[in-house]
Structures are given as structure tokens and as C-alpha cells.
Amino acid sequence: MGDENAAAAGTSMVVDPKLLELLVCPLTKGPLTYDRDAQELISEKARLAYPIRDGIPIMLVDEARSLDDGPETAA
């Protein structure tokens, strides 16, 4: 059951490195940087952070967090 808590905290989910090589920002088509701690893919050019949920990158601009807003806070 400890794994469930780690997964909920986003600490045990790992994205396939080969997948990360293929993904680009849907807005700018630029490269993404993987932030393992925040479980996000960062587009510096678009200033957006795309969330990774259950190991799956959510590559929708509407779901992305603006980097100008600062880090997301957990409720």
C-alpha cells in the first residue's frame, strides 16, 4: 500500500525516456524538459508546464500550467 501513496504523491511514476525524446510542445513544437519532482514536462519557449498523470503526459494546452503563475500548490 505504500506504493499507492507514492503514486498519489507522484514520486514513483516514471515516464519512458524514449517517449520523452519524441514529445514536443504542442503549441511551439519546441523541446520539453522533464521535471521529475513536479511530474511535469516543461516548455520554456511557451512558458507552460504539461502535467504527467499516472505516468501519462497530458499534452493539452488547456491542461498546462503557466510557468508565470509559479509552482502549483497541493490542496
Image (cartoon, rainbow, N blue to C red):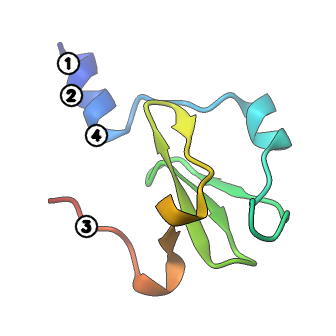
The three-letter code of the residue at mark 4 reads Ala
The three-letter code of the residue at mark 2 reads Asn
Q: Residue at x 48, y 59 (%)?
A: 63
Residue 29 shown left or right of residue 75 in the figure: right
Q: How far apart are marks 4 and 1 (CA)?
A: 11 Å
Q: Do the residues labelled 4 and 2 touch (CB within 8 Å)?
A: yes
Q: What residue occupies the far bottom of the structure in this picture?
A: 68
Query: Which mark sits nearer the N-terminus, 4 or 1?
Result: 1
Mark 1 vs mark 3: in front: 3
Query: Which mark sits nearer the N-terminus, 2 or 3?
Result: 2
Q: Distance between the residues labelled 1 and 2?
A: 5 Å
The three-letter code of the residue at mark 3 reads Thr
The three-letter code of the residue at mark 1 reads Gly
Which residue in the structure is indicated by mark 2? 5
Which residue in the structure is indicated by mark 1? 2
Q: Identify whether 28 is placed above or below 70.
A: above
Q: What element carries label 2?
A: helix
- Tell me if mark 4 has few (under 14), some (14-19) or many (20+) residues whose alpha carbon lies within 10 angstroms of its own: some
Q: Are marks 1 and 2 in contact (CB under 8 Å)?
A: yes
